[in-house]
Amino acid sequence: MTAGSRELVLERVRAGLGSVESELKSDYANSPRLYTQRGSMNVNQKLALMVERLREYDAAVVECRESALDESIAAEIAGSGRRTLAAPEGLPRQWLASSVEWRIDHDLTNQQIEQVEGVVTASFCGIAESGTIVLHHSLTEGRRVLTLLPDWHLCVLRASQVVETLPEYFARCAEPPPLATYISGPSATADIEMTRIKGVHGPRFLSVLVVRDDGSERA
Amino acid sequence: MNHPVRESHPVLDPRTAAPFPEAALPVLRNAQLRKNVAHATDVIQGKRNRLVAEKTDWLELRDAASALRAHVLEHLAEYLEQFEQRCTASGGVVHWASDGAEARAIILALLREENATEVIKIKTMTSVEIQLNPALEQAGIRAIETDLAELILQLGEDEPSHVVVPALHVNRSQVREIFRRRMGLEDLQDDPQALTAAARTYLRAKFLSVPTAIGGANFLIAETGGVSVVESEGNGRMCLTLPRTMITLAGIEKVVPRYRDLEVMLQVLARSATGERMNPYTSIWTGVTPGDGPQRFHVVLLDNGRSAMLGREKERQTLKCIRCGACMNTCPVYRQTGGHAYGSVYPGPIGAILTPQLMKLEHAETLPYASSLCGACYDVCPVKINIPEVLIELRAQVTDRERESERRFFDPIYLGMRMANGAFANAGRFKAAQRMARIALWPFTGRDGWIHKLPGVGGRWTMTRDLRGLPRETFREWWEKRGKERAR
């Protein structure tokens, strides 16, 4: 069934396009790309915008210096009042605050992940213009399910990972990632009378710890 | 498998839907529905306009998006093959469906292999296009819609009326009634927060237990074989992550050449669709990743009339559409009628050009006329589809068809046009026609020189406007008279 239809569909597509003169067909390389590729902000402006946009989405944002990272994570966790947290396999050991019980993801089941109250991960990139955090699901960012089922996501974002525009993120991808999740604020819906409601299915609470690792001044 | 499937509640099917003007009438009398539609479209449009205005490179983004989509369509076969090859290399299985019936059959066969009795679904308009849910129901498989709006419609036995916010015609108290009845929640309040929480609880158990999911695709990435789904709620991520098996149904036009092209498409899509700088969640996955997400992944590439559109130069641009819905929110016709009057899962201006092309034209003949040709849809379209141009082209096709049809000799408009054609073709006949029209119209012409009401077909014109009565003397008559007077 499928093999025949494959040829049929492709044949129809080619037949349809037969009317397009091949010299009139556009070239991918010549496609116009005159939109803003690189932002114009300095490091401080860029970070300030990232923080502002995250807060617009009701994400909690805390900033710290690289040297104070471990204690800042511990403080965030303590402040959250949560007791059981999940962590990706590759999360730095020193990030695992001793005040809570950790479930390290060496193949946790969905049910086990559903039981924890939150998750701590690193991230791949932050996009200031839209307040977006990009995960490529590496060993420090965790499997996709890990940042989905728990109700709270504490995400560590380094200033050096923050870009101003979306195209700058793509410029940072040496290779396209097989898996990626772009998160712009916590889960939300506006399906009922266009009223924005936070937290439909994904984590209802997103906290971002912005680490000043690039010598930029503290805002 | 070629006949339409039966269903327990009315399905948006252009083959059985009433003509647009007929279907629009009850809506125009439904004040509540019009209020709901006006509110929703106002809100989205306001947000969209604000966010487009702040984007200094909007026009350049639009140019890039438009050129990329046009480029893909010109090279569609190559990009589809590339996508298939890369997706397969990453552990996905690619299926090809020439029409809706075949897509349904493929999906049903896959579900039987899984012994599925239930499936969780991400919102996909393409599945409504092929009437998947009724087919699943018939096969004894329960489809559970997990997008909040789709859940409201499914539980309320209703149909989508917008491609982005499908339940925009339903207000909060109507949602409460539906949830109360179908979820057995007697004390449910009607604030959106409580209603959303009810949906979260209702669906959570399903996400964790149902092993098979069906969804659509916003983009198929040829370079990597990856698929992207853009959403807000996280129900998509749930379906893409928790089940054992994922089935993606995607129109063949959904391809983009490279991963990096998302930098264009996502920027224009989020702003146009929901008036956001970026939607809350965008997922990208490639085939199967060991240890992460579904370990069986199928993509069904659906033609269903799309390839036929490629051959027509003006109509081809219809396939550039990325389903943002901006044309609906801005359309003065859609804003009055809402989506159901279009009798298709694709309503509004894009639906008025897409539906007649996906279906046989005769099933949607009135849709190309469901527009004032004001061009607002073209202005907001992020991929620059010249919808009015295609509407006019389709109107011409409708007229051509009518010219061939048997019943034309009973159609007063056709007969009138024939007569006008005869009269305009010859000066003598034209003069005679003028004289006759003057006599015929005289009884209907008021003292003010205007015709306010005509009988028969002419009444359709005077229903909403007056017509200037014919003057006692035409210019030609005056000219001839003047010539004779001078000659004297």
Image (cartoon, grey):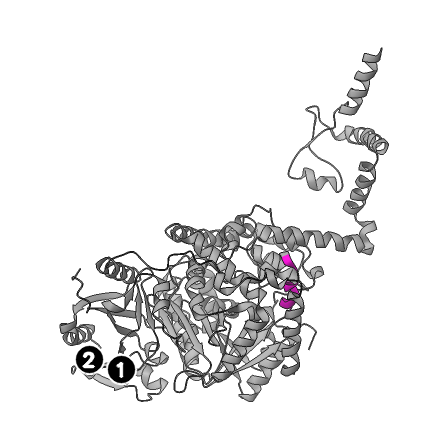
In-image side of A11 versus B407 (left or right) = left
Q: Which mark is residue A87?
A: 1
Where is residue A13 drawn, in percent x and y? 63, 70
Helix, strand or loop at label 2? It is helix
Query: What residue lies at 77% left-to-right and 31% top-to-bottom?
Result: B441
**For this rendering, which residue is in front, B440 or A50?**
A50
Residue B234 seen in this snapshot: yes
Q: Residue at x 67, y 64 (%)?
A: B359
Is residue B471 positioned above or below B151 on the image? Answer: above
Quarter residue A136 falls in: bottom left
Considering every residue shown, the one lying at the far top of the view is B488
Q: How crowded is the residue under tag 2: few (<14 C-alpha within 10 Å), some, or many (20+)?
A: some
The magenta-colored residue range is B305-313
| Residue toward you, B88 or B357 | B88
Residue A109 placed where, x, y %? Answer: 35, 87
Q: Amino acid at mark 1?
A: Ala
Q: Disc 1 is attached to a residue of which chain?
A: A
> Disc 1 vs disc 2: Cβ atoms closer than 8 Å?
yes
- Pointer 2 residue: A95
Instruction: Classify 10 Å Cα crowding around label 1: few (below 14), some (14-19), many (20 and above).
Output: many
Identify the main secondary structure in magenta. helix
Q: Is residue A217 magenta?
A: no
